[in-house]
Amino acid sequence: MNIEEKLKAAILLALPENLSKKVRLEDILLEKPKLKNFGDFSTNLAMLKQHLVSEDFANPRELAESIVEQFNQENSDIEASVAGPGFINFRLNDRRFWQIFAGLATKEDELFPQNTQSQKVIVEYSSPNIAKPFSIGHLRSTIIGDAVANLYQAMGYQVFRDNHLGDWGTQFGKQIVAIKKWGDEEAIAKSDNPVAELVKLYVKFHQEAEQDEQLNDEARLWFKKLEQGNSEARRLWQKCIDWSLTEFSKIYQRLGVKFSENDGRGFGESFFEAMLSDLIKQLMKEDFVKEGEGGAKLIFYENDQYPPLMIQKADGATLYATRDLAADKWRLEQERYQGKNGEHPIIINEVGSEQSLYFQQLYRAEELLGWYQKNERIHLKHGLYRFVDGKMSTRKGQVIWLNEVLDKAQAKAQDLSGDEETAKVLSIAALKWNDLKRNSQLSVKFDWDEILNLQGNSGPYMLYAYARAKSILRKAKEQGIKVQQTSDTQQLSDAQQLTDAHLLVEPLEKEIIQLLANFQKIVKQSQQELNPALLCKHLYSLAKEFNSFYNKYQILQDSSGEEALLRRDFRLQLVAQVSFIIKIGLKILGIETLERL
Ligand code: ARG
């Protein structure tokens, strides 16, 4: 039980009898008092009107006074008091803080025991398209999806990380025609950016096709050949995949992102191709799947809740949706995705919000088919990037090459740090934090000054706070002081010893202890709300308080006397805890730390 839960339980025990029957633990809301010297927690419980009705109290303040009196009789570690018209404030005494401090976890698996959940989770993210640029939208998907997968893993879920590559579809007919007519395979293979060459060819195809209708027929023919397994078609298609994946894997490597499925490559759309004709046959047996005009096949929704979803075109071609349906059906059939008690997996698709309607159609279809229930399918959406820097603006037709964005971030970070390895880590931290620090559904302002700002809410700020903490610990070690290091077995200071020494806890220390103690709860909440921004916010508060603490106190100053030593050791342990939590927190967000900066 964390401190807030303990406090709620104690409040419940202090309620007048009538009330204690009606109020449940979850009805009690604890907040931070607006002013710090009002205490550590506050509740408006006594001010909720319904509580007065059957009680013998004339007004909220009277009720609050009664609760406070009872509470203070029963608790010696926390002091309650009434404020204003009936707020109750609670102040933890120092002994309580020492206890919380001494009870902090010092090992990662204490905070996050692995594989405790029976249900499993598939997080599908990134999912760029073959022979197309890896877009900024795919970058967002990669960063957010990876963080959410980490959050689930931290909370004890077995997580499968999938990449639904766009590697199938009629566009490959056009791409093949373009390569054959105007392309030079050798030159593409040798170029710095083969995907850029493929994009150029694809654009050329569309320009030429405006003059020459026949090209489209040729493209359809080549896609047919591809579907039928024609070796030339397959060979060129495979080339497109290889060239693109070489490019994409450079990006994943720089971002430090890995997938677990299909040998790390992810199950792309083409993997499901062989299942499509059977799937369509099966779907046609349902009465909500019908043939439309001209012979296209569509899923229709009750009361036209959504527009119909096409699963096969009139010419027999399948679509994006057909392959998503096949993927999700296949996932249901794989033993390893099933929960320990036979639950279906939870499937999370991290895809831009522009595909909202599509995913609603898809999920509803999967419900109608009896495959998944509502809570088993989640569209984790993200908004757009807005570029502040004119040069990087997405003017019509202008492609942003992600490797160039990463290079630019790195060059800018190098101005801050000077050294190349550091700049790599710093720049990726900056980009990821910029993306994760706000609700992912909002669009992101892409502003280099904000992203790399050392003073503000930025990735580099977080890394500097961590490195600062580590440098204090190194100095202590050099001076021969033994400091509890994370993940070793040594215990934190004994709460009793600190209490007996009558050491007072300073307000900043209280703040930090509470932030440390709440970390696990925040990670859980971030996972439940699929919102890494909550974790960012918490870590940022911790880093800020730590920086104030670091600036205010000479932690390693010469200390003589038992009390000074006790305090110094406590503070060093606090610093070790801060570095431990920042490191794990950033790791969950997919951000690497640096020991020195
Ligand atoms: N390749 C798609 C795109 O770039 C995203 C795929 C998302 N995942 C899915 N299961 N549909 O728009």
Image (cartoon, rainbow, N blue to C red):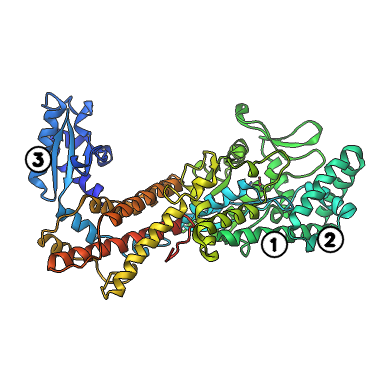
Judge the density around disc 2: few (<14), some (14-19), many (≥20) Cα neighbours within 10 Å.
Answer: some
Q: Where does the image place residue 244, in percent across and percent down from the top left?
A: 72, 57
Kindly identify the amino acid type of the residue bearing the numbered disc 3: Gln
Give the label, 1 or 3, closer to the camera.
1
Q: Secondary structure at mark 3?
A: helix
Element on which disc 2 rests:
helix
- Quadrant position of the C terminus in the picture: bottom left
Q: Which numbered disc, 1 or 3, marks the residue that appears first in the sequence? A: 3
User: Is the C-beta separation of discs 1 and 3 under 8 Å?
Assistant: no
Residue 587 location, x and y as percent?
A: 45, 59
Q: Tell me which amino acid carries mark 2.
A: Glu
Task: Report how far apart the C-alphas of labels 1 and 2 lie in the structure.
Answer: 15 Å
Q: Which residue is mark 1?
A: 246
Q: Which residue is mark 3?
A: 70
When asked about the image quadrant of residue 568, the answer is: bottom left
Q: Residue at coordinates 60% horizontally, 52% vertically from top-left? A: 126
